[in-house]
Structure formats: C-alpha cells, structure tokens
Amino acid sequence: MKVLLLYPLFPQSFWSYDRFMQMAGLKAVIPPLGIITIASMLPPDWQVRFCDRNVCPETDADWEWCDIVILSAMLAQKQDFLSLIRQAGQLGKKVAVGGPYPTSIPEDALAAGANYLILDEGEITIPLFLTAILAGAGEGIFRADQKPDVSLSPMPRFDLLAQDAYLMMAVQFSRGCPFNCEFCDITTLYGRKSRTKEPGQTLAELQALYDLGWRGPVFIVDDNFIGNQRNVKRLLRALIPWMEEHRHPFTFITEASVNLAEDAEMLKLMGQAGFYAVFLGIETPDQDSLKLTHKLQNTHSPLVAACQTINQAGLLIYAGFIIGFDQERAGAGQRIQAFVETTSIPQPMLGILQALPNTDLWQRLEREQRLQQLSGIGSVEVGDQNTLMNFIPSRPLTEIAREYVEAIWTLYEPKHYLRRCLNQCLAITPVTGSRQYRHFPIQKGLLLLARLIWCQGVYRSEIRVQFWQQLWLIMRQRPQFVSMYLGLCAAGEHFFDYRVLVKERINQQLKQFSLAPVTAAETELTPVSSAL
C-alpha cells in the first residue's frame, strides 16, 4: 500500500515565530513527532511519503501516487486539517486521521469525510486500524481502553525529516501528568500517571539524530518532564556521560511544572546534561485563581523565588500565563505584567482562558450552563491564544479583552522586550564547565546574526542604541550566553508583529458582538519587512 503522511499547516500564532523563521532561513520550529512515530508502526512493505506542510507542501503527483492519506492534527490546525480530509474525498482517496484534535472532537473529522479515526494513542490503535484495513474494512473508529506502555514505542522515523528546515529536533520521554489542573486537557488525553520510556530508548533516539547529522537544540516534548521524577533522574544520569562522549552535540529544552524549583538534585542533573531552558506553566500570580483551578503545585512556595532558583541553576525560563479565570479580580493583566517584569521572563505566552473539550473545566461549565459556542471564535474554532473565551466569564468580557491586549502590547514593546532578554541572561548562573549554547549551524547562524544586526542594530532607530549597549554588556558579563541572548533578540522581531495581530484579532471578535474595540498605546515602530 502507498501511504501519504501529511501534517497540516499551523496558523500564525505565538509559537509560529514567523519573522524569526524568515530571518534564520528556516520553515518550522519543531517537527511533528507523533506522525513520524506512526510511520514506524506501518507494515515494512508499505511505501511511505511524508510531507510537513509547514515546511513544503505535497504535490499533485503525491496525491495521484497514494492509496491512502494519513493525517495528524492539533486543535490549532483545524482549518487545514479539515480541508485536507475534504480534498482526499474529492480525489477518491481513503483518509485516516489521528492526533489530539480528532481524539478530542471526532465529530469534526467524521463530518469532513474521514474514513478511519485512529484515536487515543497509536501504539494501541494503529494495530487495530491495520487489522481492519488489511481485512478490507472501508471505514472504522479505533479507540483504546487503556494507556500503552511507552517503553515499547518504536523509534520515530527521523529519516523522513528535512532537518535543515527546523529550528529544533524533538524527542519524547514521557506521557501524562500527575497534576489535575482544571483547564488542561493533558490528563484527559494521556492520563495522570506519567509513563516513561527507558533511558536507553531515549539515548538510542538521540543517537539516531546524531547519526543523521543533527547538531543543535532538541525539544523534549513531554507536557511535564518531571512528572515521574525517579525515572527522569535515571535518564539524566545516563544522558550526562552520553553527552560528554559525543562532545555535547545538543542542548535541551523541555516543559515542567514549577515544583522543579523544589528539587535541587534534578536542577543540577539537568544543567549537567545540557538543558538550557524550561517552559513553566505559571498561569497567574493570583493565589486564589491557582487554587480555584486546582493548580496547587504553584502555591507551595513563592513563584518569584521559584523562578530565581531555576535561573540560578543555569536555566532560561519561558512561561505560560492565562487571563480570565473564574472570580478573577480586575487588574489580572497588570499583575501578570508586574510578575513578568520582576522575573524578566523574556517571552511570556499570555492567553485568554479556553474551555477545552472534555476537561474538568469544560464539564463544570457545562453543568453550570455557561458554555457558549461563539461563531468563529473560541479555542475549539481557532486553537490559538488570542481568541475570546468560549464560555460566559465571571467578569465583563470587554474588561478581560482590554487587559489581555494591553498586557501583550506592553510586554512586547521592543524596549521592554530587549531589556528582559538582557536581564534574564544576566540572572542565569552559568553551569560549571558549560559551553557556548549551540543553536544553529554556522552558516545559518551567521545569516541570522547579519539580519539581526541590520534590523535592531541599524534599521530600528527606536532600539538601535539599546541593542548595542546591551550586546556589549552581555559579552562582558555573560559571554557563555551571547548566542542565547542574540537568539532571544531575533525572536523579538516575531513578537513585535504578533502583538499587532493580537489586537486586530481580538477587536474583530469584539466587533461581532457589537462591543467596543480595545485600544493600546501605539508605539512608533520602524517597519522591517522591506529591509529583510
């Protein structure tokens, strides 16, 4: 059988890094790990072609060649995902779908014309699908009644990737999270038990990337890397000598809960293993909101102190924040801004709360009859951070929208952003024996540097002096972090554009409900599109 694996387009979003990708000569941030793992589960006599549409679209010849199309998608990819299902149907091709989006909302894929729904986790449902299709079944829905043992998961088909198109490579060590945050769908999809691979399994995946020539950052995509602390430490103790033997070819970034700050041994091991950054789900500095949404792990110790501890262990902090929790006091946006400035987190991901399907929040709001399907908006529709909530909030919607837009606008004002990039790098304590962080091949690194110097060191008059002063300071005080710092500065070009997009999108949605638009203090920015 001839199989065409397609990964749908992502819309422009916080995570798309559009301008940064353009400056660096790249196409996408990370590859789709799920679908290339599925590729490893297909029969060896099946022919496979893979296209990540964020990197390069498939051709008419690919469609003509294939017998069946397999798609995987997240909520944010809804538009292109459904369009591809319809296209397959029009061309008379069978189509199978899986991933978080169809698992959460299978009705959408069925309505679009999908023939096979391979839901939940593929280690269990792919074999069911293969049995059915080899028996001649023309359709089917395949679900799992248990969670698979990921220590038996096959190695992803890294060989299918156009590596030079991506900012990072990706591996997965665990699935699931032990916490019970009301708004999060991770436990709904993957359970509360953190299931891990064996250390040797992950090292073999890293070896495969190494053998294929990858050098640079690797994103460990676990939703909570430290969910199973005992097994994570086993991995780190094995990873440290592997990294030394291979002369530190990679640097690592992952996601973790804030209680990482409470485990000094874990922080030390992560630093020694080559971790340079961690994404934290901070959500809000408001303790009442954290308790209400059951994010109790964030209430054990002061959040500012936790961030300082993680910086002192040698890690850069990225973080997520949410506005719009129930019974949230007015001024939440300003309090988040103050927290971000205090901790100098350079790239805070701020979003308006969404009720994701089947989460505890969704179920509670359904019982309270507060869910509302707003035409064209809500995360189920768009899947991005800059959409109004899809439920009736406990305070005025316009107030939440205004605080959100004002926070994004102020946080990503270029002078503020560059100042946080500097202060974050100065706050990080270098790990003993640490090296320069390897983020790009030399040629692409030089291209990015040249374009960054042109944009911020020459063309943008509003930050030109600040750029050169801060670069001199970081070179003197934290030379280990020069590459990291310049990468953060370059990413700012995306966020300077993104904040304009946020305001436009929110105002478009408010207009649908005849609500007053949000205004934000306009900052005179030098356009750089033509300069690139």
Image: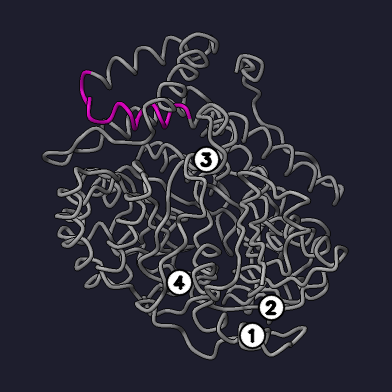
Element assignment for label 1: strand
Asked which quadrant contains residue 405, the reply is top right
The tag earlier along the polypeptide, 1 or 4, is 1
Q: Circle 1: is it few (<14), some (14-19), or many (20+) Cα within 10 Å?
A: some
State the quadrant of the N terminus. bottom right
Q: Residue at x 67, y 56 (%)?
A: 77
The magenta region covers 476-490
Name the residue carrying label 3. 165
The mark that comes first in sequence, 3 or 4, is 3
Please state which of residues 217 and 262 is positioned toward the viewer in this rendering: 217
Query: Which amino acid does the dot numbered 4 rest on?
Result: His
Q: Circle 4 sits on which residue?
A: 294
The three-letter amino acid code for the residue at tag 3 is: Ala
Q: CA distance from mark 3 to mark 4?
A: 39 Å
Give percent across and percent down for residue 114.
77, 73
Describe the element under mark 3 as helix, strand or loop: helix
- Specify the amino acid type for callout 1: Phe
**Residue where numbered disc 1 is placed:** 142
- Of callouts 2 and 1, which one flags the residue occurring earlier in the amino acid sequence? 2
Amino acid type, residue under disc 2 in the picture: Leu
CB of mark 2 within 8 Å of CB of mark 1? yes
Whole-percent x and y of residue 277? 33, 46
The mark nearer the N terminus, 3 or 1, is 1
Tell me the distance, in whole angstroms, between the alpha carbons under discs 1 and 4. 32 Å
